[in-house]
Amino acid sequence: MNKRIEEAYAKRPKRWIYELVIVLITAALLVWSGSAVETSGTTQNGAKIALNILAGIFHPDTDLLFNLTTQGVPYLLLETICIAFLGTVVGAVISVPLAFLSASNLTPAQVAFLGRIIIMAVRTVPAFVYGLMFIRVTGPGAFAGLLTMSLCSVGMVSKMYIEAIEDLDTKILESLDAAGCSSWQKIRYGIVPQLMPNFASTAIYRFDINLRDATVLGLVGAGGIGAPLIFAMNSYRWNEAGSILAGLIVLVLIVEWISTKIRVKLARG
Amino acid sequence: MKLYDKIFPPRVIELPNGKQIFKYRSRAPLAVLVLLFLTVLSVKVTGFNMNVLVRRIGEFFVILREMFPPNWSYLSQIWQPLFDTIKMSLLGSVIGSVLVIPFSMLASTNIIHNRIVVSAMRLILSIIRTLPTLVTALIATYVFGLGTLAGTTAIAIFTFAYIGKILYEEIETVDMGSFEAMEAMGATKTRAFVSSIIPQVLPSYLSNCLFCFEGNVRYASILGYVGAGGLGLILNEKIGWREYSSVGMILVVLFVTVFIIETISRAARKRLV
């Protein structure tokens, strides 16, 4: 018995060369990237600055936090939610036709490839470049932020939609065919029930991300909570930044909790 | 949802054998109502205006048109920031994903049975995850000065939170048989974790790290906007100067880089899982 085990162990596939090469490549890449660490910029009082920042953040400006005018944190948060929500909805709607066009099991390979390249290109452009482009269209404000959010969502959402479409179980369609269903019935009872939970779940997930990334919009003045946050940080008003951050963190945690619940429900049917 | 069923009572279907079955009313109308309300509210707050959009959408393509053809002569100056971006994301991803392993272990309910420790760890991970990367990058530039170190730190923190959540969910779904057997033989928790849990979660862990790295390369190009080094720095500068053909060149380079990295990492991930 033991002998057989030892024989089998001795005959195990020898992959050490392959593994060694991978380890070497990884190590080389790490050493190469280690040169990114330039400590020259670190000043002696870096730790002191960090402590100051933390002190400010943990003593948030309560006036701003509970101020109900349009300058206060609650309204800014509402605006951010609205930007993220409508951005997600618009993005998800645009993604549906794009995803069907680029799914390799439905369209010819060339069309699908082209669609994928376009989606990748849309995803590559950083959010603030889109923000600048849309500000030309709508002027600064929440509207530009909303359009930016939708375009940024399209990249990721359509990629995940494509995966869902490519995972479609075609056997169901065949059995509906055999039962004599029309194309419309096949879509209604064969395709929609398979895709709907997945699509909804992806959109909710993206809403989470959009809410968190909404700060990026503030960089170019495209509305939401980003701009006041960045301004407060750039002018070292850490109490103010602390109160905005506190509001944002609480909001994101709540939204994440709700969205996880909904997504679990969607996944289990 | 109990309340919903009380207002709209389920339809009762009686089977031939006398058994009663409740067919609950669809929740779709409720969901549609909530969505509709939120949409109307969002349209009000953000000032969404289809008219403006249709009338002025041409303006969107003004900058886009100026980006093409890209300014090829600018290519030689892009390499350095590009490599900085890749280095930042690589190092940040590795540091974050390695540092998080013990924390993920402490946040999994099947290994640590103390509820307080688990919830505390999860709360910490959640809070770190909600911190916008831009904010961590900005704080890092105050601490470490302008440069790639700040960007590396911000990416490491982001990766830490992202991988942390996925990893503890992964750990909770493993087969606990070998872990319990090792513990019964007298191994410590850490020893049992290393020898029985890690081999099970390693492939998906590596795959997630690669996926996170892909995203980080893209994200690292934004961080330069707050002075954290890399492509964002020159991107910001060229946008400021309105040299849109150079901006186009930077975007083309970024696109090709992301494409190459994604192709390699997708091939690697296919072998892993």
Image (cartoon, grey):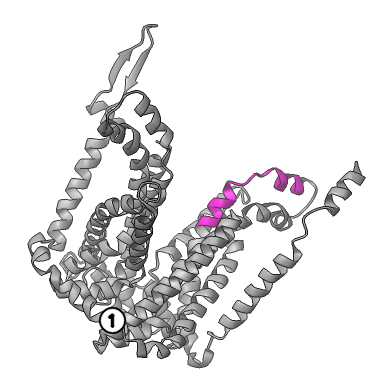
Residue drawn where x is 77% and y is 55% of the image = A13
Residue drawn where x is 37% and y is 57% of the image = A110
Amino acid type of disc 1?
Answer: Pro
Instruction: Give the position of the N terminus of chain B as an image quadrant.
Output: top left
Instruction: State whether residue A163 is above or below residue B134.
Output: above
Asked whether residue B175 is drawn in magenta, I would say yes
Q: Can residue A140 be seen in this view?
A: no
Residue hosting label 1: B69
The residue lying toward the viewer, choosing from B129 and A162, is: A162
Question: In the figure, is residue B50 to the left or right of A267?
Answer: left
Q: Give the range drawn in magenta.
A: B166-183
Chain at numbered mark 1: B
Instruction: State whether residue B156 is above or below residue B23.
Output: below
The crowding category of the residue bearing disc 1, from other C-alpha atoms within 10 Å (few below 14, some 14 to 19, many at least 20), is: few
Give coordinates of residue B44: x percent, y percent.
12, 58
Give coordinates of residue A162: x percent, y percent.
38, 51
| SS at circle 1 | loop
